């Protein structure tokens, strides 16, 4: 039965919901790895993670092992991390710097630009072995605001066009969150293993409906510490959710006041001392501006399929199996800002995120609970119907963008429109 | 210099520390969290780094970096019934082994994120935490470092640092207290 469904993904997605099989069926997962992760732009890393020639990091695009490397020529390449001889990975380290990658099985050596330059005892190989068997280099690698994407498919539109003006406007806001100063990725990221399907994280990162419930304990703790009872601004009529072209989306609580977030900063370890340092370094006039940007831009952005920009971090969603996913959460620091500011940014991030934060673990618990509930086969549908039929066009320069209330399931409907289009092979070009 | 009286003192101190730490582990296994929290000094640090080489919690991204106030928040959250990631609770069973009170130069290292002061001891041990929740039993392996401050005939915890064996790998949710 699953093979038939994979042939017709439209049967699994309706305007107002999705079928449980999309989270459970291993054939659907295998089809996703092929039709989504090797057909569209996929997020890899931030440029500041590979600043120098030879800098590399290893990761996966879908299930494919890849080395993202800045070659001797300064160019970024995504190379398939697999020896062209008999398949051993050529790079085992998570990050590093190398002029070349040597496969230790039989000693073939590749430049960090991918060319095969060394084959031991070459006389027993055909003369053209070096020309034929360089590492496979993904045909497309492009960046937007430091975010590096790659595609296995040569014929995808340029990245900027794929993203479109809607989501790039939000990415710009996110990247300019601290006085427009450049952001750099922290060398460490929280990585959390979830025993659930990757799309549960895709939906949840843009879910403006859940915070007051899933994260109630967080808001309670903060209320006790700060005296103010501000929750997620879900009732403001000006707070929006948006679905842009190609499954990208955002939620924007549009809170005018940064006060409650800054009150949280004052509860961090060593906060008084570090805030005094910041004040002394930047002066009274700039102090408030720095503080305003400290907790991030206050928006959540989703770039389909695997990137989210939330708070001060970059979130990369890494599917592992139909019911296994790793979520990487990497904070961004402000380049050129006082050390005290970046110190506080990391503490602010740790408060909510990571395997033992006061927020993120409760999202992961909900993924577990959904996975258990999915055992109920009698009601096969999950409902994404909040605000359906009440969305309005955005006027953001992209005819595809629709806007709903922040608690609406507008982002998720957009994500699943793109999911079904990719799975059915209907996406441009 | 290392005559019998000095050896006696070392053995006595190690024994006192070990007794205290076994009781600490037992409070956690019994989920007596308020009592457990009362073992900590007012200026305490409860710390789970990601990098075993780190000697200052401010020098990197941590899994947990709690001062005493934040640790109280953590306990309050777990006791509220609304920390869903630990509802129902984890049930744990801890094994502490190889408890050593460091002496000499080692005793004044910043391995715990601070340098022990007068009347404080730097103590290390290996820990195995068996944890059962929602039909899954798993095991966490760690190296634990404490700074214990003399307090009457007992101690206060000034620092508890846990270096998980797999801190650099993707981790499961760790909402419960280690
Ligand atoms: S598999 Fe790489 S050299 Fe043989
Ligand atoms: Fe959440």
Image (cartoon, rainbow, N blue to C red):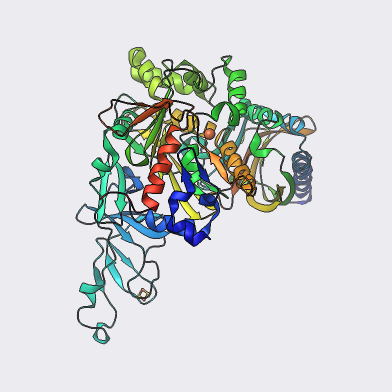
Q: Is residue B42 left or right of residue A163?
A: right
Q: Is residue A364 left or right of residue A93?
A: right
Q: Which percent across, then down, holds residue A288?
A: 38, 16
Q: Which quarter of the figure has residue B89?
A: top right
Q: Is residue B156 above or below residue A74?
A: above
Q: Which percent across, then down, holds residue A38?
A: 35, 56
Residue A321 appears anywhere in the view: yes
Q: Which quarter of the figure has residue A342?
A: top left
Q: Which quarter of the figure has residue A224?
A: top right
Please tell me which residue lies in front, A285 or A15: A15
Please tell me which residue lies in front, A94 or A150: A150
Please tell me which residue lies in front, A361 or A280: A361
The residue sitting at the top extreme is A285
Q: Which percent across, then down, holds residue B132?
A: 72, 49
The residue sitting at the bottom extreme is A124
Q: Which percent across, then down, holds residue B149?
A: 69, 33
Q: Is residue B12 left or right of residue B174?
A: right
Tag count in the figure? 0
Looking at the image, which residue is at 39% across and 20% down? A292
Residue B114 appears anywhere in the view: no
Looking at the image, which residue is at 34% across and 26% down? A178
Looking at the image, which residue is at 24% across and 48% down? A157
Q: Is residue B46 left or right of residue A74?
A: right
């Amino acid at each position: 039965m699953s093979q038939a469904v994979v042939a017709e993904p439209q049967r699994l997605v309706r305007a107002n919901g999705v079928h449980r099989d999309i989270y459970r069926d291993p054939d659907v997962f295998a089809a996703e790895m092929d039709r989504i992760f090797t057909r569209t732009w996929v997020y890899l890393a931030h440029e500041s993670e590979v600043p120098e020639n030879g800098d590399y990091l290893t990761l996966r695009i879908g299930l494919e092992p890849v080395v993202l490397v800045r070659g001797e020529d300064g160019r970024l390449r995504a190379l398939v991390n697999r020896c062209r001889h008999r398949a051993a990975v050529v790079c085992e380290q998570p990050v590093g710097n190398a002029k070349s990658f040597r496969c230790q099985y039989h000693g073939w050596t590749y430049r960090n630009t991918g060319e095969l330059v060394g084959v031991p005892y070459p006389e027993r190989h055909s003369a053209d072995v070096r020309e034929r068997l360089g590492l496979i280099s993904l045909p497309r690698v492009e960046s937007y605001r430091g975010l590096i994407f790659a595609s296995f498919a040569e014929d995808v539109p340029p990245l900027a066009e794929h993203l479109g003006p809607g989501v790039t406007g939000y990415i710009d806001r996110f990247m300019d969150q601290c006085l427009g100063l450049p952001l750099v990725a922290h060398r460490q990221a929280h990585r959390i293993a979830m025993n659930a399907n990757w799309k549960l994280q895709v939906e949840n990162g843009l879910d403006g409906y859940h915070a007051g419930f899933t994260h109630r304990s967080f808001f309670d703790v903060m209320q006790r510490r700060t005296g103010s009872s501000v929750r997620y601004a879900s009732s403001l009529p000006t707070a929006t959710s948006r679905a842009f072209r190609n499954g990208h989306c955002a939620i924007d609580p549009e809170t005018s006041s940064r006060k409650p977030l800054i009150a949280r900063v004052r509860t961090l370890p060593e906060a008084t001392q570090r805030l005094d340092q910041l004040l002394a370094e930047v002066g009274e006039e700039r102090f408030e501006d720095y503080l305003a940007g400290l907790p991030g831009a206050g928006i959540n952005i989703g770039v389909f399929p695997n990137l989210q920009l939330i708070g001060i971090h970059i979130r990369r969603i890494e599917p592992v199996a139909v019911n296994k996913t790793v979520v990487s959460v990497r904070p961004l620091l402000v380049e050129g800002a006082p050390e005290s500011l970046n110190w506080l940014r990391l503490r602010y991030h740790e408060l909510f995120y990571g395997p033992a934060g006061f927020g993120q673990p409760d999202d992961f618990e909900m993924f577990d609970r959904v996975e258990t509930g999915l055992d109920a086969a009698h009601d096969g549908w999950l409902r994404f119907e909040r605000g359906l039929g009440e969305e309005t066009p955005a006027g953001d320069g992209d005819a595809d963008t629709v806007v709903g209330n922040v608690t609406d399931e507008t982002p998720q409907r957009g994500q699943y429109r793109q999911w079904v289009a990719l799975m059915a092979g209907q996406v441009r070009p | 210099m290392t005559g019998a009286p000095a050896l006696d003192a070392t053995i006595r101190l190690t024994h006192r520390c070990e007794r205290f730490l076994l009781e600490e582990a037992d409070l956690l296994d019994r989920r007596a969290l308020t009592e457990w929290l009362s073992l900590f000094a007012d200026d305490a640090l409860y710390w789970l780094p990601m990098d075993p080489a780190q000697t200052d919690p401010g020098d990197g991204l941590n899994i947990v970096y709690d001062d005493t106030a934040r640790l109280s928040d953590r306990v309050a959250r777990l006791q509220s019934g609304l920390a869903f990631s630990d509802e129902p609770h984890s049930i744990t069973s801890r094994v502490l082994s190889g408890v050593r009170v460091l002496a000499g130069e080692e005793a004044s290292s910043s391995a715990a994120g601070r340098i022990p002061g007068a009347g404080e001891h730097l103590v290390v041990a290996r820990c195995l935490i068996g944890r059962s929740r929602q039909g899954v039993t798993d095991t966490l392996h760690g190296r634990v470092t404490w700074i214990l401050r003399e307090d009457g005939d007992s101690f206060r915890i000034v620092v508890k640092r846990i270096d998980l064996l797999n801190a650099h790998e993707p981790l499961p949710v760790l909402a419960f207290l280690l």
